[in-house]
């Protein structure tokens, strides 16, 4: 059996040490400016990658992060695990009880917030593919679906952080945004599973129709029978096994097994991890403290590996295309906000509250980055499109909080004026 030699072990350990320490440093830097840690971690990758270190000192970059060799393969393995775990904790944040509580309003916001930007992104890409550079004719349909999905998804972890910062997380509007984002997460991943199949990432024997039915069937089975089994076993686990070690190890074991199953049947492993996270996170026996421990473990060890790795393979300066960046920004900021705002108005919200919901739902983040990385690896998108998606993610994160705050202030002022007139 092949093993890492002495120098490769040293190189791998240095890579992990440099990535984790610099990612933490840049994450803390981002937090100083009230930005999510993910912004700093992506920036850390850009600094350590070919964009800056590779241009300033290519010898050190090549020595630290070789593109070939056993240490590069093992590091890639760590990154693949990190992606699976990131989707697992994204699933943990989906609270189906909140979704049912919000009812028709959440359904209205989520459907319009999903359909309008998806259709707009698809149409623009289908009829004007030259805006994105060269697109192969046989990949035109799946590429249009991919861009539509990018426009439609809302980053649940990031929007939750924004709502907490604005101190409206527990309000009716905050719960409406969270519930709507949860519905989009569930539907978005089923859509992306279809896209993965069309990309050729699924089993050759698995048809598109079977992929859809297996995805839906697996989701329903895990959220009914699977969740029931988890509910029955968690009290025994919490009582009999060492806490929190027993819960943590078994949770991750379930995550990996679900990911392995969906990968085996021809659906990407991240889908299995996400649905297992939803089933486990929705259990009444999984405490908030337990969730926090799982979050802290993954977010501070594995998440930085993935987000830093994004910058290690791309020169962001040479791959920056202003036209593609503007197309994505304008499409997302117009149609995503319009769709969510329209859905909120249909749900009975006032004008300014509806706009606040629209700006909140236009928050992009972790999931879009993961999807884009998979699409880049599959050869569906170019480095230029990938960089443009990262710009969209950062821009939406920076814009969502101040725009929501401004709308809420306008709404409060409008209510005050109405009371004074009375």
Image: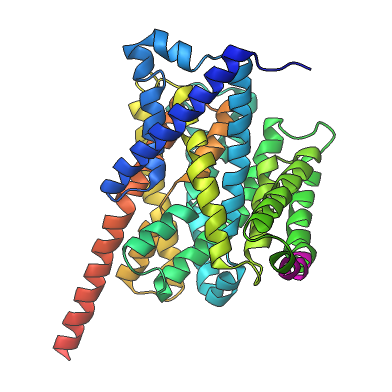
**Foreground: 414 or 237?**
237
Asked whether residue 386 is in view, the answer is: no
Asked whether residue 51 is in view, the answer is: yes
Q: Which part of the image, by quadrant, shows the C terminus?
A: bottom left
Does the magenta portion include 219?
no
Judge left or right: residue 81 versus residue 310: right
| Whole-percent x, y for residue 389 in the image | 44, 36
Magenta-highlighted residues = 229-236
Tell me the residue at 74%/41% (across/down).
267
Tell me the residue at 71%/37% (across/down).
197
Magenta region's main secondary structure?
A: helix
| Whole-percent x, y for residue 286 in the image | 63, 66
- Above or below 202: residue 256: below
**Foreground: 124 or 98?**
98
| Whole-percent x, y for residue 204 in the image | 81, 31
- Above or below 388: residue 296: below
Tell me the residue at 27%/65% (across/down).
407
Which residue, as the protein is rendered here, is positioned at the far top?
Answer: 59
Q: Quadrant of residue 378?
A: top right
Judge left or right: residue 89 versus residue 211: left
Image coloring type = rainbow
**Foreground: 321 or 223?**
223
- How many discs appear? 0
């Amino acid at each position: 059996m092949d093993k890492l030699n002495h120098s490769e072990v040293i190189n791998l350990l240095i890579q992990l040490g440099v990535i984790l320490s610099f990612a933490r440093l840049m994450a803390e830097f981002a937090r100083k400016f009230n930005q999510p840690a993910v912004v700093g971690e992506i920036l850390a990758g850009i600094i350590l990658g070919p964009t800056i270190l590779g241009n300033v000192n290519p010898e050190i970059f090549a020595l630290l992060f070789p593109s070939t060799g056993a240490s590069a393969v093992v590091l890639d393995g760590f990154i693949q695990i990190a992606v699976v775990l990131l989707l697992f904790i994204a699933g943990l944040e989906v609270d189906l009880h909140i979704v049912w509580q919000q009812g028709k309003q959440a359904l209205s916001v989520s459907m319009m917030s999903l359909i309008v930007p998806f259709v707009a992104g698809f149409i623009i890409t289908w009829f004007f593919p030259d805006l994105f550079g060269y697109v192969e004719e046989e990949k035109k349909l799946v590429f249009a679906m991919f861009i539509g999905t990018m426009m439609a998804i809302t980053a649940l972890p990031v929007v939750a952080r924004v709502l907490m910062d604005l101190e409206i997380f527990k309000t009716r509007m905050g719960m409406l945004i969270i519930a709507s984002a949860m519905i989009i997460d569930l539907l978005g991943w089923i859509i992306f599973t279809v896209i993965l199949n069309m990309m050729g990432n699924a089993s050759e024997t698995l048809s598109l129709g079977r992929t859809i039915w297996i995805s839906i069937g697996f989701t329903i089975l895990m959220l009914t029978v699977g969740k029931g089994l988890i509910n029955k076993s968690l009290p025994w686990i919490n009582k009999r096994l060492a806490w929190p070690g027993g819960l943590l190890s078994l949770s991750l074991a379930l995550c990996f097994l679900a990911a392995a199953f969906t990968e085996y049947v021809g659906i990407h492993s991240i889908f299995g991890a996400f649905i297992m996270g939803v089933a486990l996170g929705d259990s009444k026996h999984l405490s908030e403290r337990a969730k926090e421990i799982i979050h802290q473990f993954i977010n501070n060890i594995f998440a930085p590996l993935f987000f830093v790795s994004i910058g290690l393979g791309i020169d962001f300066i040479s791959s920056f295309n202003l036209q593609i960046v503007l197309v994505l920004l304008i499409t997302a900021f117009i149609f995503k906000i319009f769709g969510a705002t329209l859905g909120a108005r249909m749900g009975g919200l006032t004008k300014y509250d509806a706009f606040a919901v629209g700006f909140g739902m236009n928050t992009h983040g972790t999931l879009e980055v993961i999807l884009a990385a998979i699409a880049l690896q599959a050869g569906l998108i170019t480095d230029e499109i990938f960089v443009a998606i990262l710009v969209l993610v950062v821009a939406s994160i920076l814009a969502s909080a101040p725009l929501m705050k401004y709308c809420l202030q306008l709404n409060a002022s409008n209510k005050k004026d109405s009371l004074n007139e009375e």
